[in-house]
Amino acid sequence: RIGGETNPKYRGPHVFPNDFPALLPGTGSQTSADNPLFVAAPVHGTAKVICFSERHDLSMARLPVSGIRKVVDTWIEQTEILAEEYRWVAIFENKGEAMGCSNPHPHGQIWASDFLPNEIVAEDKTQATYLKQHGRVLLLDYVQEEIERQNRVVVENETWIAVVPYWAVWPFETLLLPKRHVRQMRDLTASEKADLADILKRLTTRYDNLFETDFPYSMGWHGAPLTDNSSEHWQLHAHFYPPLLRSST
């Protein structure tokens, strides 16, 4: 690793501290200022790396479903650990040089923080408003509509569905959701965990098959804030954003 440290010999997923963490644990308080326009507050958190397996030649699409299930279990284990201290845990993967990934071997990241990112704040507000107005969970209603219409479904199994969202901005963007109400990844049942591994394998394989290449993407999980007990409006989901594709002409 950068800095001279060596990871132990491992099999399956392995989690270790990011050598270039974007978030750091620490202490501190809001900085006072003479003018309310110039106020700063510290942000506390931690950043980890998760290698999917000891095989650095196997991307998510090439891992066996049993190997992906181990990744899912590790995501949940890490969420449980970090929930004891932090409000938000971001689980994501930037795959490929086109997405800014600095190391070519398959891996993801796990960041935890004491604040909610702006995108999560917006999703929280929108989902809460929909529940208040309609008495139903926004993304569950959306899942049912996509199941009935079938024209944007990429792949689905018994408990999960991946679609090209109606509001997609990027080429080949997809949205992955459970079919029942699930607030956080740690709320998944055993069968839903198994089906998640299955659908991740199938979805990422389809990405690779689009252009018969190791397809780059950014994938991130969004779920209810860890410390919020009044978040019935939330539905767990993952965004897949491939890179912006430009014409060569």
Image (cartoon, helix red, strand yellow):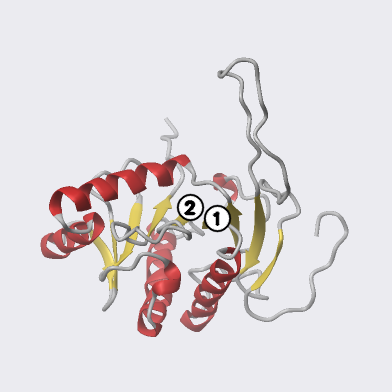
User: Where is residue 29 shown, x and y percent of the image?
Assistant: 68, 38
Which structural element holds mark 2? strand
User: Where is residue 196 shown, x and y percent of the image?
Assistant: 39, 74
One can see residue 104 in this view: no
Measured along the vertical axis of the image, is residue 73 above or below residue 105? below
Q: Identify the residue at image location x=62%, y=50%.
A: 101
Q: Is residue 239 left or right of residue 19?
A: left
The residue indicated by pointer 2 is 217
Q: Quadrant of the C terminus?
A: top left
Which structural element holds mark 1? strand
Q: Is residue 220 left or right of residue 140?
A: right
The residue indicated by pointer 1 is 95
User: Where is residue 204 shown, x and y percent of the image?
Assistant: 43, 64
Q: Quadrant of residue 137?
A: bottom left
Measured along the vertical axis of the image, is residue 3 above or below residue 195? above
Q: Is residue 23 left or right of residue 76?
A: right
Residue at the outermost left position: 148
Measured along the vertical axis of the image, is residue 232 above or below residue 180? above
Q: Identify the residue at image location x=80%, y=60%.
A: 1
First of labels 2, 1 by sequence position: 1
Q: Identify the residue at image location x=38%, y=81%.
A: 189
